[in-house]
Amino acid sequence: MGYHPQPKALNQLLRSRKATLNDLPEIIALLNDDVLGQTREQSGTAFEPRYIEAFHRIEKDENAYLMVILLGEEIIGTCHLNLLPSLTFLGSTRLQIEAVRVATSYQRKGIGEWMIKQAIAYGNTHGASVFQLTTNKQRVEAKQFYERLGFEATHEGMKLYTQTT
């Protein structure tokens, strides 16, 4: 991961697009490039077939969008977006933002903020009026980052894991 332009110049070089199956190894590497991800994701070049199955399910879901962020041809970030039709808020649409990752070597350069703005623009284009995400309680800096972007911790998130990996 060579040349690192200054943040303002860097953002002008970024682009986002829908992920393809060929991007999967790089996406998995990004998910693993993290203290928590290292405990639950697979690393290496040969990976679990469940990743491919999950990718195909995401790809077929008209309410899902798996985004990659590129600097040149290098994938340096990813996030998974899901449009959620809802009866609440007068039948609004929500955008759930998941699996937000920026390569460690590119963090603190404005890329995460750029990516979240791209996600919000995608949601706006698709009629979303509520944007939501969760962040692990161990990720204190991530919570501060999202708050700086205007997100509010209005709910206490809960998860139930029913299968071991």
Image (tube, rainbow, N blue to C red):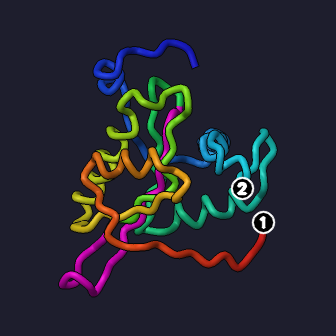
- Looking at the rendering, the stretch of residues picked out in magenta corresponds to 75-94
Answer few, some or many: residues within 10 Å of disc 1's Cα (few below 14, many 20 plus, some between 14 and 19): few
Report how far apart the C-alphas of labels 2 and 1 lie in the structure.
Answer: 8 Å
Q: Nearer the viewer, residue 35 or 125?
A: 35
Q: Residue at x 67, y 44 (%)?
A: 32
Amino acid type assigned to the residue bearing label 1 in the image: Thr
View extreme (left): residue: 90
Residue that carries the numbered disc 2 in the rendered image: 40
Q: Residue 123 or 35: which is nearer the viewer?
A: 35
Whether residue 32 sits left or right of residue 88 in the image: it is: right
Q: Nearer the viewer, residue 31 or 155?
A: 155
Relative image position of residue 74 (x, y in whole percent)? 53, 28
Q: Quadrant location of residue 2?
A: top right
Check contact, mark 2 vs mark 1: CB within 8 A: yes
**Residue type (three-letter) at the residue carrying disc 2:** Arg
Percent coordinates x, y for residue 7 in the rendering: 34, 22
Which of the image's four quarters has the C terminus?
bottom right
Give me the residue at 29% from left, 57% from top: 151
Say few, some or many: other residues with alpha carbon within 10 Å of mark 2 (under 14 / 14 to 19 / 20 or more): few
The residue that appears at 21% across and 81% down in the rendered structure is 89
For residue 143: magenta?
no
136 to 88, vertically: above or below = above
Label of residue 165 in the image: 1
Residue placed at 66% from the left, 49% from the top? 37
